[in-house]
Image: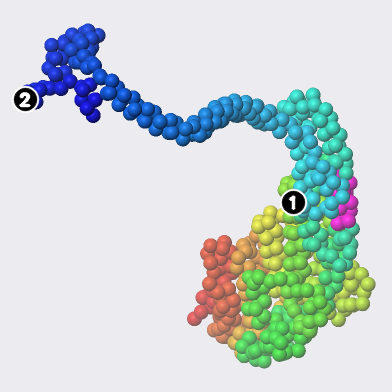
């Protein structure tokens, strides 16, 4: 410390405190340029060194040596650190070079990856387009034809579309590739193999239709699951596809003919409630000649088809004329066709419209299903069909069925149960052998006509299927002809009855013939509440019945009552016309003006109301 004090300038102890000499001396030079200022500071501030004696120098040297020894010790201790730092620096330099190299490589790889991605994007469509999957080829050749096999058809169709695009121009550059030639050859071979597999599949399915163990619905379901295969066949080999269509149509012609013939045979075993001549108007006049007699319309009759009564074949007049309330429900109730096993074994008897309904339900449901299948499977959803030998496909397929259907209707409305031979070998033979006096069931024939019209509206208006139009028109004409014949029979029977009612008329009470005429006309009107009867033969038939009844009743009143008994004659006419009007009102109920048939039906009832008012006292 003494040595340091000697090296430093010492101020006198009694000197007054003053500013640091450096600051005081610097003030005059603050404005001076910097280089000159520094020179002046060194000259003024730095004191002149004080000379040291020998002892002081040795002291400083010993201090320096001690300090040097300490420094040497620390230097030796720091040598490993120096070595480590040197090695770390070398490694850091090496790592830095590696990072620079990696950065360069990364940039190179990024560039190459971008180029590879660009090339892949360009080559990928070409590879996918021009290469045919080997698994698909194996599946086309050996896998079973089922819904999963349809994926092969999609791949094959895609390759065919690519070839078409190359040939037509959009992808013409593919022609430069050798892979395109290989693809074209592969597609040709695969197409030929696929056509062969589809051909075998279609043959097997069509053959299975002749098996009694399978129904047509099962076969059609299998075909619909593979309809893409047939559409592919139709594009690849149109003539073969057409041959399959023809084969299917003729096979189904046989299928429906045999199945419907068997079902019709079972329906013929049902017991029919036969309405013979005994139910015609006035046919029972000998047993019931007055309104309050044995045959009164108030008398009860067993319910038709009641389980508590023995099923009968011939219907009594009382049962017949009171049956309309239940029989009319067949036009509004939903029903399904009864199985053939039940038809063969049921002990009950049925009205003829019920038996026809079973045939109609089976026929319409099968025709609708078949039409939709043909459109979907063979015609790819299009409903415009090419003709086959100048015929529509449904005329070929359903021709025999429509034929036996018309024969069945003829049998149903003209047969006599006692003449029915259930041992006949053929349907036509059974039908032809049973035609005799026929049915006089006007209600039944008219109900069958309404069922035909209902089925026609369902097929044509709901499903838009033209298959049944001609068939239903033919059946309708056939039934209207039979209906007018029955009306003629009623008119003739009524004429005969009135010739035997002179004594009954003299009592002045309504006649049983009046009751039957009213119930007959009322039943016809009740069946026709939703139809414009003026556009049908029904209108003229009702007019004929009404006119014939009025004419015969007037003649009877004139012959039964002399001119002196005019009042009794008018009472007799009033009672009969009032009964007719009352029964008609009861039968038709409240009419809905929106149906379009209300006016024509109301006109019939109003006519008898006018006759009643004319003879009212």
In the picture as drawn, the residue positioned furthest to the bottom comes out as: 294
Percent position of residue 553, x then y: 64, 78
Front-most of residues 52 and 608:
52
Disc 1 designates what residue?
Answer: 376
Q: Which residue is mark 2?
A: 14
Mark 1 vs mark 2: which is more N-terminal? 2
Q: Quadrant of the N terminus?
A: top left
Please tell me which residue is depicted at 85% across the width and 46% down the height of the picture.
Answer: 138
* Location of residue 147 in the rendering, given as x and y in whole percent from the top left corner: 77, 53
In the picture, residue 20 is in which quadrant?
Answer: top left
Q: Which residues are magenta?
A: 194-206
Main SS of residues in magenta: helix
Instruction: Residue at the far front: name it.
Output: 55
Of 612 and 192, nearer the camera is 192
Q: Is residue 414 visible?
A: no
Labelled pair 1, 2 in contact (Cβ < 8 Å): no
How far is disc 1 from disc 2 in space, using C-alphas? 130 Å
- In the image, residue 602 lies at what x, y percent? 56, 68
Above or below for 283 versus 375: below
Q: Residue at x 77, y 40 (%)?
A: 157
Q: At x 80% / y 26%, what residue is drawn? A: 177
Q: Residue 277 — which label? A: none
Q: Residue 532's quadrant in the figure?
A: bottom right
Camera-nearest residue between 579 and 500 = 579
């Amino acid at each position: 410390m003494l040595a340091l004090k000697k090296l430093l300038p010492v101020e006198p102890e009694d000197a007054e405190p003053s500013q640091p000499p450096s600051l005081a001396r610097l003030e005059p030079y603050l404005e001076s340029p910097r280089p000159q200022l520094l020179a002046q500071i060194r000259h003024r501030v730095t004191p002149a060194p004080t000379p040291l004696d020998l002892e002081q120098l040795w002291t400083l040297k010993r201090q320096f040596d001690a300090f040097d020894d300490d420094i040497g010790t620390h230097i030796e201790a720091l040598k490993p650190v120096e070595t480590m730092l040197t090695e770390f620096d070398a490694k850091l330099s090496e790592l830095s070079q590696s990072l620079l190299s990696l950065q360069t490589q990364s940039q190179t790889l990024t560039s190459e990856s971008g180029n590879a991605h660009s090339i892949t994007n360009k080559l990928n469509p070409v590879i996918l387009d021009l290469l045919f999957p080997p698994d698909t080829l194996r599946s086309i050749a050996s896998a079973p034809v089922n819904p999963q096999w349809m994926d092969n058809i999609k791949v094959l169709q895609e390759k065919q579309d690519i070839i078409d695009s190359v040939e037509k121009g959009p992808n013409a550059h593919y022609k430069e590739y050798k892979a395109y030639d290989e693809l074209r050859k592969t597609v040709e071979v695969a197409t030929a193999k696929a056509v062969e597999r589809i051909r075998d599949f279609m043959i097997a399915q069509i053959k299975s239709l002749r098996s009694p163990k399978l129904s047509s619905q099962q076969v059609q379901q299998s075909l619909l699951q593979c309809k893409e295969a047939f559409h592919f066949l139709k594009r690849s080999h149109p003539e073969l596809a057409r041959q399959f269509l023809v084969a299917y149509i003729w096979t189904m012609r046989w299928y429906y003919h045999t199945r419907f013939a068997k079902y019709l045979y079972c329906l013929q075993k049902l017991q029919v409630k036969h309405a013979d001549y005994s139910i015609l108007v006035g046919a029972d006049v000998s047993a019931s000649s007055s309104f309050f007699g044995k045959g009164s319309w108030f008398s009860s009759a067993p319910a038709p088809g009641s389980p508590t009564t023995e099923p009968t074949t011939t219907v009594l007049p009382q049962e017949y004329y009171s049956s309309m309330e239940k029989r009319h429900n067949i036009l509004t109730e939903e029903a399904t066709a009864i199985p053939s096993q039940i038809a063969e074994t049921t002990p009950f008897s049925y009205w003829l419209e019920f038996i026809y309904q079973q045939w109609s339900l089976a026929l319409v449901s099968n025709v609708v299903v078949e039409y939709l299948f043909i459109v979907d499977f063979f015609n790819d959803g299009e409903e415009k069909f090419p003709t086959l030998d100048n015929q529509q496909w449904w005329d070929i397929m359903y021709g025999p069925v429509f034929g036996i259907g018309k024969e069945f209707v003829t049998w149903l409305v003209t047969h006599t149960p006692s003449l029915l031979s259930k041992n006949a070998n053929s349907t036509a033979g059974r039908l032809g052998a049973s035609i005799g006096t026929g049915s006089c069931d006007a209600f039944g024939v008219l109900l069958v006509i309404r069922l035909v019209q209902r089925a026609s509206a369902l097929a044509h208006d709901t499903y838009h299927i033209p298959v049944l139009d001609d068939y239903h028109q033919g059946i309708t004409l056939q039934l209207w002809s039979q209906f007018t014949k029955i009306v003629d029979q009623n008119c003739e029977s009524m004429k005969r009855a009135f010739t035997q009612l002179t004594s009954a008329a003299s009592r002045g009470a309504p006649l049983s013939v009046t009751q039957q005429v009213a119930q007959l006309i009322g039943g016809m009107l009740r069946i026709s509440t939703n139809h414009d009867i003026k556009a049908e033969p029904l209108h003229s038939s009702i007019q004929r019945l009404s006119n014939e009844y009025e004419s015969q009743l007037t003649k009877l009143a004139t012959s039964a009552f002399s001119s002196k008994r005019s009042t009794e004659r008018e009472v007799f006419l009033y009672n009969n016309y009032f009964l007719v009007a009352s029964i008609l009102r009861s039968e038709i109920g409240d009419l809905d003006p929106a149906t379009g048939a209300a006016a024509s039906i109301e006109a019939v009832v109003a006519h008898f109301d006018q006759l009643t008012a004319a003879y009212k006292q």
